[in-house]
Amino acid sequence: MSTETQNDGDDLEERVTNFLRRNFPQIQMHGGSAAIQDLDRETGEVTIALGGACSGCGISPMTIQAIKSRMVKEIPEIEQVNAHTGMDGGDDMGGGMSPSFPGETVDDDGEADEGPEAPF
């Protein structure tokens, strides 16, 4: 592999990391984390692992869907995005408790309300 190719690959990884930081700051604000688990430069496939409070969080499926749809639009080299939390496959991503959000309550009958909509 040439140095130029390696530098391009490092740039791609950096762009994916910056994409996550820029587009999803609420992940960190709510005690979660997002990290590149795998990046295949040849196929354009990236796997993102959400950990911390994202494991078991009710809005993590919406966050995952937003990551998948936005990343392929913003980063042309990315063809496919796989994303998951530690709750769905046994990966040790530091599972955590569900974060609480302002306005999230439990009704007297024990059923949780839907809480706020995803902030993105």
Image (tube, rainbow, N blue to C red):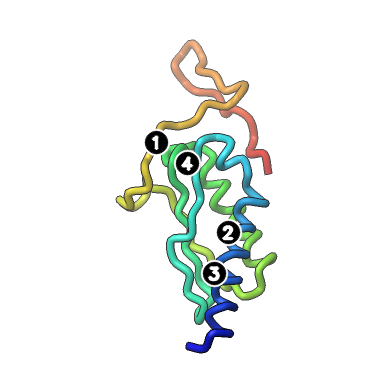
Q: Residue at the location (67% across, 39% down)?
A: 119
Kindly identify which residue carries mark 2.
Answer: 17
Locate residue 50 relative to residue 78 in the image: left or right.
left
For the view shown, which residue lies furthest in the left direction? 90
> Height in image: 59 above or below 75?
above
Locate residue 54 relative to residue 93 in the image: left or right.
right
Q: Residue at the location (57% across, 73% down)?
A: 79
Kindly identify which residue carries mark 3.
Answer: 80
Amino acid type assigned to the residue bearing label 4 in the image: Cys
Mark 4 or mark 1: name the one nearer the start of the chain. 4
Q: Position of residue 37 (x, y in %)?
A: 43, 61
Q: Nearer the viewer, residue 43 or 2?
A: 2
Q: Residues within 10 Å of mark 1 (few under 14, many from 20)?
A: some
Kindly identify which residue carries mark 4.
Answer: 54
Q: Secondary structure beneath disc 1?
A: loop
For the view shown, which residue lies furthest in the bottom direction? 2
Locate residue 92 relative to residue 12 in the image: left or right.
left
Mark 3 or mark 2: name the one nearer the start of the chain. 2
